[in-house]
Image: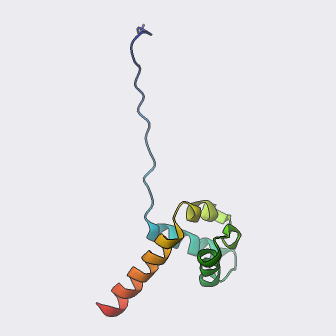
């Protein structure tokens, strides 16, 4: 039997954090699956901050709310520049 006067340690496994690009992909797919125009919906969310632009399907709304809106813009801009100017 263990001594209860000693400090007990617990190891909790953390889920791997998603990259911003992964969040964008998941949200895009969820919006497409529900029949929305993903570009319009994501832009609406970025411009207004209103999470109702994003469907809750596949936990997309919760995921996108974990990312700052300026990070979303930054990721899209980086991708655009990488694909078009390099």
How many numbered discs? 0
Q: How is the image coloured?
A: rainbow
Compared across the picture, whether 21 is left or right of 33 comes to: left
- Asked if residue 17 is positioned above or below residue 79 in the image, the reply reads above
Residue under the point 64% across and 79% down: 44
User: Up-down: is 12 above or below 58?
Assistant: above
Quarter occupied by the N terminus:
top left
Residue 18 falls in image quadrant? bottom left
Q: Work out whether 58 lies above or below 39.
A: above
Q: Please provide percent x and percent y for residue 67.
A: 51, 64
Q: Residue at x 57, y 65 (%)?
A: 64
Residue closest to the eye, 60 or 77: 77
- Residue 8: image quadrant is top left
Is residue 25 toward the left or the right of residue 1 in the image?
A: right
User: Which residue is found at the position 63% from the left and 64% from the top?
Assistant: 61
Asked which quadrant contains residue 26, the reply is bottom right
Residue 80, horizontal then vertical, whole percent: 41, 86
Left or right of residue 85: residue 13: right
Identity of the residue furthest to the bottom in this view: 84
Q: How far from the left and from the top, in percent, is residue 48?
A: 65, 75
Q: Position of residue 62 (x, y in %)?
A: 61, 59
Query: Where, quadrant-wise, is the C terminus in this rendering?
Result: bottom left
Q: Is residue 6 left or right of residue 67?
A: left
Residue placed furthest toward the left: 86
What residue is rendered at 44% in x and 36% in y?
A: 12
């Amino acid at each position: 039997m263990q001594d209860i006067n000693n400090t007990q340690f617990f190891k909790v496994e953390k889920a791997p954090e998603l990259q911003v690009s992964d969040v964008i992909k998941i949200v895009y797919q969820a919006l497409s699956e529900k029949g929305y125009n993903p570009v319009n919906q994501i832009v609406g969310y970025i411009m207004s901050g209103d999470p109702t632009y994003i469907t809750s399907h596949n936990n997309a709304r919760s995921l996108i709310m974990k990312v700052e809106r300026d990070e979303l813009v930054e990721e899209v801009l980086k991708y655009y520049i990488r694909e078009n100017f390099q």
